[in-house]
């Protein structure tokens, strides 16, 4: 029985001496300066600072920072994410990947919201000299609409916010 106990003690010492994956990843710096810009209702552009000796970058994304998934790998320090839902908030992070496949910790998470699409089929019907009826098809992701009047001289009245429903 004494021999079994000694073997278990040796195995426990070997297992605890192995470096944890997070310790390995700490030797590879995470990208810094991650920024996300919604360039349209369905597209986000990510940019970040390059990391020395990075072979590539792993782009992570999701709608919850605690449940992010791999979106793609790239060798560039910019990434365009297309075919998104309008009016939706997304979270992103990036990891450095070395030639040996070692991953850094994720960069700090950034959040971006795509704007709603513009309404389609906008029509104006003159009711009286000082009254116009506007109609349009609802836009995906819109919860309200801002309507303003632009005069011939280019001046604009403050927007009137019209809530949906």
Image (cartoon, rainbow, N blue to C red):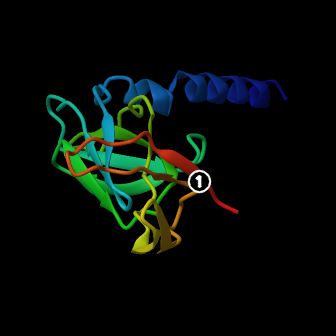
* Label 1 Cα neighbours within 10 Å, binned few <14 / some 14-19 / many ≥20: few
Does residue 57 lie above or below 108 as drawn? Answer: below
Q: Residue at x 42, y 54 (%)?
A: 70
Query: Can residue 102 be seen from the camera position used here?
Result: no
At 33% from the left and 42% from the top, the residue drawn is: 156
Q: Quadrant of residue 25?
A: top left
Q: Quadrant of the C terminus?
A: bottom right
Q: Is residue 140 above or below residue 44?
A: below
Q: Is residue 125 above or below residue 97?
A: below
The residue beneath circle 1 is 162
The image shows residue 151 at horizontal and vertical percentages of 28, 49
Q: Quadrant of the N terminus?
A: top right
**Of 68 and 10, which appears nearest the observer?**
68
In this rendering, does residue 18 appear at all? Answer: yes
| Relative image position of residue 108 (x, y in whole percent) | 42, 28
Q: Residue at x 38, y 31 (%)?
A: 107
Q: x, y (%) of residue 78?
A: 20, 45
Q: Nearer the viewer, residue 144 or 71?
A: 144
């Amino acid at each position: 029985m004494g021999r079994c106990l000694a073997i278990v003690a040796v195995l426990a010492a070997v297992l605890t001496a192995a470096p944890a994956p997070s310790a390995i990843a700490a030797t590879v710096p995470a990208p810094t300066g991650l920024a996300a810009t919604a360039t349209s209702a369905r597209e986000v552009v990510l940019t970040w600072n390059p990391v020395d000796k990075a072979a590539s970058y792993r782009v992570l994304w999701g709608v919850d920072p605690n449940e992010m998934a791999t979106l793609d790998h790239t060798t560039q320090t910019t990434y365009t994410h297309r075919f998104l839902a309008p009016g939706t908030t997304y979270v992103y992070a990036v990891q450095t990947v070395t030639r040996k496949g070692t991953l850094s910790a994720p960069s700090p998470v950034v959040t971006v919201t795509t704007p709603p699409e513009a309404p389609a089929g906008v029509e104006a019907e003159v009711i009286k000299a000082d009254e116009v009826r506007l109609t349009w098809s609802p836009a995906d992701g819109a919860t309200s609409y801002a309507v303003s009047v632009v005069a011939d001289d280019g001046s604009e009245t403050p927007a009137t916010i019209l809530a949906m429903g």
